[in-house]
Amino acid sequence: MNYVAFRMLVGDPTKYLGLIFAVAFSTFLLQNQTSIFANLLKRAGNQIRDVTDADIWVMAPKTDYFDQTRPLKETDLLRVRSVDGVDFAVRLFKGLPIARSPTGQFAASTVMGLDEATLAGAPRNMVMGDWRDLLKPDSVVIDEAGYLLLFPGEPLRINRTIELNDNQVTIVGISDALPAFTAFPIIHARYSEAVSFQGRQRQQLSFVIARGKPGTTPEALARKIEAETNLKALTTAEFQDASVSYILNNTGIPINFGITIFVSTLVGLVVTAQTFYLFTVENLKQFGALKAIGVTNMRLIGMVTAQAVLVWFIGTAFGSALSAAFFNFSLSQIPTRHFIFFWQSAVGVAAFMLIVIIASSSFGLTKVIRLQPADVFR
Amino acid sequence: MNAVECTSINKSFGTGNTKVNVLRGVDFTAAEGEMTFLVGPSGCGKTTLISIIAGLLRADDGGIALFGKTIADLSPGKQILFRRENLGFVFQQYNLLPSLTAAENAAIPLLAAGMNRSKAVKKATEVLGTLGLGDRATSAPRLLSGGQQQRVALARALVHEPRLIICDEPTAALDHKSGENVMELLASSAMQADRAVLVVTHDSRIFHFADRIAHMDDGVITHASDSESAISAH
């Protein structure tokens, strides 16, 4: 009888395609919005994630997230180094100077000042050039998106000069740094040069980044540093989570996306549920004839469920394929670079759509089950 | 042996002031090897009676036996199984599934019984052949005339070789010639010594096919007659 169910489903191409479209459209909309939202939040922690040389971040107490820092004292570096279990700890500076190209293009930028000796925190994914060239005087590495912002429409080329708050520097490399939430160009330089771009302040040290000796866990060491220095110490993962939480709690982005996702869910639910419910109800007469002939309620439930699962499978597959195509395209675009299609979004939305379709077919099924087969004689 | 034996069947719908007694102590029999017609004015209870005989409705009280088996004694699941194996239906509006071919429609009782699809369709195609529709087996119902659609419905009623075929106004939607054709096929295909056909109809033009005609009015069987006297009375 599953064959009969299948033929009933595809027998009217307009209704069938309408069902598939409703499911595919809803799936695409939900997967798209949830994944974009998750990608945006992920950006809040991208610059933390990009520093692969350390797994502990030490910062001033009350620091909430990456872009909100208060300088530490130079002696704080030594205090962190003195904590038992710390293998190494180095400076990391973060400043926001204005970058300007020779043609006059300018943009606020995020400059990361790296430890002079180790260059810990330097970008490891390079599009062009070598990050070790940061050891040369007045040299910087800029991310690809930042380069294209300052040199729009021009090919990537190293050894070009830009100004950072009136300091002329040479681009020795172009990195594929993960995009920041602020979308500013991301520039890496040596610590001593980065602080001079920013202008002198009484204290300049933004972060101390550290790594534990073998046998210590980052979590335990971070708690130990906090206890011994009265500074805030977080693991890389904890700092990323804190930065994401800050965006969630202090910006309108979650509300904005929340409304969009809610409306998408509502539209998807209503369109899909109503279409499938009507499909079942419009076939009531046929189901009645089948009941009279001797098809059991259980068999009819199986038939409607088979129809629902098939519509879900095809519709979700189309919707997911559209989402995958969208994110594949967005990966190649500078503003949406590194935007990925989260598998959690794909699986979660697919599961949600299955629930919607099963629920809507269940509403129709109650009519089928209550249907008196004698009605076919009327 | 009687194919159908109904004793003192009562059935009402609604409650209180809206209660309508549709069947009032109906006694009715249909013998094996005979085509029995159930005739009467609209609203007299014919459809309710055949629905109860078919096990699609439950009588308020009274007894029903089909081929000597008391249907009320069977569990709901067994009743469905009994209906599937022993009863065939021909509806006034054909009730064919528009998305299936003629052969697939005719094969539904076999598919419902769990038969393999290709075997079921093959057997249904054979039955369609005996009804003169062998060349239309793969046609969709919408491409068939009313008479052809009713013949497909007839094939569906016959394909699993049931012992009792219940027809509800089988010629109501057909012209005279098509109606005659359908009834001839019904008589030649369905009538065997151990089988019975029960036809509900208003159509006096087909009364001559009946072996016996039960007249019903206001919820009771008023009298029974043979086809000749029924035709002359009309």
Image: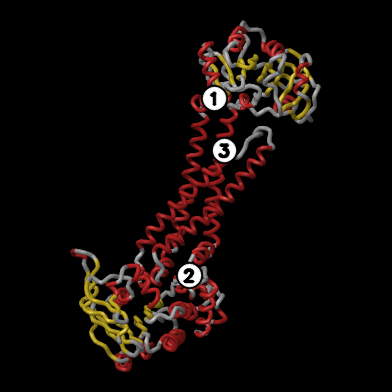
Residue behind mark 3 = A35
Q: Residue visible at 44% across and 89% down?
A: B188
Q: Residue visible at 23% across and 65% down?
A: B14
Sort mark 2 into few (<14), some (14-19) or many (20+) by Cα contacts within 10 Å: many
Inter-mark Cα distance, 2 to 1:
61 Å
- Callout 1, which amino acid? Glu
Of tags 1 and 3, the one toward the viewer is 1
Sort mark 3 into few (<14), some (14-19) or many (20+) by Cα contacts within 10 Å: many
A77, above or below A20, in the image: above
Q: Is residue A354 or residue A105 the one in the foreground?
A: A354
* Location of residue A41 in the rendering, given as x and y in whole percent from the top left corner: 56, 30
| Circles 1 and 3 in contact, beta carbons < 8 Å | no
Inter-mark Cα distance, 1 to 3:
22 Å
- Callout 2, which amino acid? Leu
| Circles 3 and 2 in contact, beta carbons < 8 Å | no
Determine the chain carrying the residue at label 3. Answer: A
Q: Is residue A304 or residue A22 the one in the foreground?
A: A304
- Callout 3, which amino acid? Ser
Determine the chain carrying the residue at label 2. Answer: B
Q: Secondary structure at mark 1?
A: helix
Q: Is residue A205 or residue B138 the one in the foreground?
A: A205
* Location of residue B4 in the rendering, given as x and y in whole percent from the top left corner: 30, 82
Of tags 2 and 1, the one toward the viewer is 1
